[in-house]
Amino acid sequence: MKRFFSKFIENGIYLLLLGIIGIFIFILIDMRGTVDHLSKDMVVKSLLRTDLELENFFSTIREDLLITAQEHSVQEFENTNYRRLNAEFRPLVKNKRQLSSIMMATSDGDEFLILDLDTAWMFRITYEGSKDSLPDELFWTDTEIIKPHYRRKNPKRYDPRSRPWFQKAIEHDEMHVNWTDPYTFFTTKDPGITISTRYRDTLENVDVVVAFDVLLTDLSAFTTELDISENGIVFILTEDERMIGLPCKSGYDTEEKIKADVLKPYQELGNDKINQTVDIWNNISNKDSIFNFTSDGENWWGSVQQYNISDEQQLLVGVVVPEKDFVGEVVHSEKVIIVGFILVLLFTVYILKAYRDKHKKNDKLRAQQKEIMEKNSLLKSANDEITKAKHELEEKNMEILDSINYAKRIQSAILPPESYWNSQLPQSFVLYLPKDIVAGDFYWMERIENEVLFAAADCTGHGVPGAMVSVVCHNALNRVVREFGMHQPAEILDRVTDLVIETFERSDHEVKDGMDISLCGLTMDTMQLEFAGAHNPLWLIRKGNEEYEGLKLTMELDGKSLYEIKADKQPVGRFAHRKKFTYKKITVQKGDVIYLSSDGFPDQFGGPKGKKLKSKAFKKLLMELCEKDIHQQKEMLEREFKEWKGEFEQLDDVCVIGVRV
């Protein structure tokens, strides 16, 4: 019984393999049909798009021609009234890229022509087909409206009634749109085609023909820009299979190259894809069909359709597209399926072999199964422990965040309230952007009689360590000013340094933390400004560019100057080469703007190249903003910082103080 069951399973695997092979063959056949269907569908869409583009190209010409003829049919045609005709026709030729010239001629041989010569405008006035007088030629520039700058007689006689466009219009009814075969224009000798129509002037008892010239180079310029796919091309032939719409991606990037190949038989272009497409189309009975062929080892699809530009005339529009442009993903999927089938086949063979060997390995498999179950049990236990540890970690993290947020409330409480700050320095702002929840930067203010002391400080580090150092330094500032009664900035920093070192020396470990600071004392009554700094300078912006004692002129912009009072190159804290801080005092002027800043703003990475803003760019930014409202400056600085930072991480705390005197 077991033997029968084993044989049954083995035969079933063979049947499954045969079924997989059958399904694979069916998928390949169906996919090939899908590829053909998609290719034909995309060629049809390309033809429809091309027809639409051509209709947009030609329809505006037809509409403008009929409108022009209808408007003139109710007024007298005077071919010598060049001022009125100039005002009417010049904008039409100038604004329609399809048009190169406009003609109006009567059955008596009177004609008016306007022609765009690129460098000038030429008007030609012909009288009775040059019977008694040669045509007049008038030349205008773009700026000349009333009269031309040059006038001459054309040395050649010219009768418009002999031209193809005139004869076409006379042969047909009024307002019938006619197109000439491609020919060489009489004036410019350029290849082109002309659209014309006529109307009857009953007052003068003459026929009037209106005609527009279209350069074949303009038509080719249109087709060379028509991009239907990555490698596909569109071309246009005359009914006798001469090229009038050259293909894109073939090097036709100048008018000279286009003009050289326009009206050539298509075979002379040496384009293998176009040659094969037209040759196949000429030899098939169903001219509307879409066909494929091979060129350079690739499968291509093509079609040629007739496009009617009038009731009597047609153009041949060809589309040639490589199959890979439309169905590259399908072809890729086809290859993936083949590879997948090979893998499935190999896997099935492997299964057969494994099945034959299974009886020898049953005991081993049972042992492995038991081992796996034991490992699964261990993994489950380990997973439970990991889950438990994860919950504990989340709880600890929540507790830490709660503690840090509470620390933020404490740190915010030691900073000067906004109401107090504004009461002491109404014309000022503080931009304070901590990197983390709590910060190492802080700002400080104290008033002693008529002097307002204020500072921007940057303590070692940021986040929780920086915040702890900031509390020590902030308390030291308060003690020195409130308890010891000091108000001279340099003396304050010297005493604060002593207190900070004394605080950290109590630790069993060596602590070298401290702060960089710019500290000012401003007395409005006497317009005196005192300053001392640790690494961080003071910047003062003032109109003019005079030299002042104690102020170093570092930058000029738009009639303003930025002066710098340098800080001492030592921190507030332990320093091997400590000296007493330098005291500096200057007289400020009304309208001066004072700026203090930590290094967080200029050291921030950002911008298009991901580099530091740097001090020079930061000072230039301050000079650009200094004349703005002092409170508006804060918003503008914050916006500039965020735009500069972009997607980059904020590297440090930011503290900027601005005060207008």
Image (cartoon, rainbow, N blue to C red):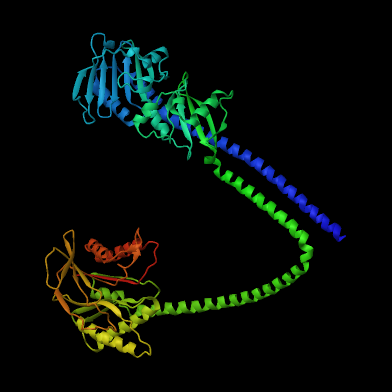
Q: Looking at the picture, how far across and down is residue 364, in whole percent?
A: 75, 69
Q: Nearer the viewer, residue 640 or 609?
A: 609
Q: Quadrant of the N terminus?
A: bottom right
In the rendered view, tell whether residue 493 sits above or below residue 105.
below
Q: Nearer the viewer, residue 267 or 28?
A: 267
Q: Quadrant of the C terminus?
A: bottom left
Please tell me which residue is depicted at 22% across the width and 87% down the height of the picture. Answer: 485
Question: Which of the 4 image quadrants contains residue 470?
Answer: bottom left
Q: Looking at the picture, how far across and down is residue 275, in whole percent?
A: 50, 28
In the rendered view, tell whether residue 239 sits above or below residue 654.
above
Q: Nearer the viewer, residue 360 or 208?
A: 360
Please tell me which residue is depicted at 34% across the width and 12% down the height of the picture. Answer: 162
In the rendered view, tell whether residue 112 sits above or below residue 416.
above
User: Is any part of residue 106 visible from this angle?
Assistant: no
The residue at the far right in this view is: 1
In the rendered view, tell whether residue 623 sits above or below residue 425.
above
Q: Looking at the picture, how far across and down is residue 457, in whole percent?
A: 29, 76
